[in-house]
Image (cartoon, rainbow, N blue to C red):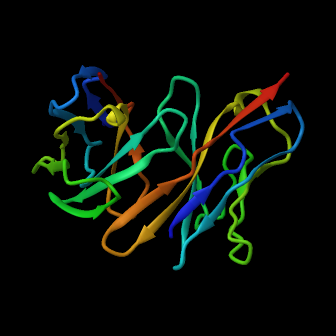
């Protein structure tokens, strides 16, 4: 079964602390993984995708096929990082379908 | 260039009724996907349209149907509404089936 699991509903850290948002997936093929972010009163938007292997707003995510994980990390959290983060997997076969996790709310305290 | 727009923003329907939600794709985008997001959950994929053809569908019953028009705008139709259909419905458009999706602000549907 294709599934994305984000074990934490809420993550609260202090400004300047490291952040790791966990994501595990279940998919039999070669996955495409994404992180989406939704800031307060804004629409859902793409943060990064694993094939780009880039850092966006200081965030990085590495695909670990052995552990079927795609955790999102940032070494020093900022207050403006407070948002809802969704991990997503795009499945191929019979068209394309994107499966989202339930999301993790990140709260960065001053 | 305008972004993805959805209408209406909110609506309330009675159980058993039918509803049509609309999505205007971002300029130049030929692919549109629809998602249902229940409270406290992530978006759930309903279906995707590419150049007016459905080319992917999630685990939703046939009473959820869609259309994509020649200008690539789209509709989501839901028949025989149930209370559990109450959710935020999101539309996302992209340049192609496998490129970055841009989301609309959503339509909040409440079924009473």
Residue A60 placement: quadrant: bottom right
Q: Is residue A48 left or right of residue B30?
A: right
Quick check: A58 above or below A107? below
Name the residue located 50 percent from the left edge and 70 percent from the top edge. Answer: A1
How many circles with numbers are drawn on the protein?
0
* Camera-side residue of A83 and A102: A102
Quick check: B73 above or below A96? above
Q: Is residue B98 left or right of residue A33?
A: left
Name the residue located 33 percent from the left edge and 63 percent from the top edge. Answer: B97
* Percent coordinates x, y for residue A4 in the rendering: 58, 59
Position of the N terminus of chain B by quadrant: top left
* Percent coordinates x, y for residue A51 in the rendering: 58, 68
* Percent coordinates x, y for residue A59 in the rendering: 72, 49
Quick check: A56 above or below A29? above
Quick check: B109 above or below A71? above
Position of the C terminus of chain B by quadrant: top left
Name the residue located 58 percent from the left edge and 25 percent from the top edge. Answer: A40
* Percent coordinates x, y for residue A2 in the rendering: 51, 67
Residue B88 placement: quadrant: top left
**Residue closest to the far left:** B70
Name the residue located 43 percent from the left edge and 39 percent from the top edge. Answer: B37
Q: Is residue A76 left or right of residue B87?
A: right
Q: Is residue B64 left or right of residue A21?
A: left
């Amino acid at each position: 079964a294709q599934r994305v699991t984000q074990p934490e509903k809420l993550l609260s850290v202090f400004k300047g602390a490291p952040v790791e948002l966990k994501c595990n997936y279940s998919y039999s093929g070669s996955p495409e993984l994404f992180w989406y972010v939704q800031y307060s009163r804004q629409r859902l938007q793409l943060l990064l995708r694993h094939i780009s292997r880039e850092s966006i707003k200081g965030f990085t995510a590495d695909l670990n096929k052995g552990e079927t994980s795609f955790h999102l990390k940032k070494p020093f959290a900022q207050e403006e990082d407070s948002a809802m983060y969704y991990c997503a997997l795009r499945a191929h076969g019979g068209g394309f379908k994107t499966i989202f996790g339930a999301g993790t709310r990140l709260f960065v305290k001053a | 260039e305008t972004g993805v727009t959805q209408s209406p923003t909110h609506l309330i329907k009675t159980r058993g009724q039918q509803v049509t939600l609309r999505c205007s794709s971002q300029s130049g985008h030929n692919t549109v996907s629809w998602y249902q997001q229940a409270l406290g959950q992530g978006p759930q994929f309903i279906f995707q349209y590419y150049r007016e053809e459905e080319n992917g569908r999630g685990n939703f019953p046939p009473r959820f149907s869609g259309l994509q028009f020649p200008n690539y705008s789209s509709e989501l139709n839901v028949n025989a509404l149930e209370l559990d259909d109450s959710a935020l419905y999101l539309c996302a458009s992209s340049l192609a089936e496998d490129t970055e999706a841009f989301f609309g602000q959503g339509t909040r549907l409440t079924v009473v």
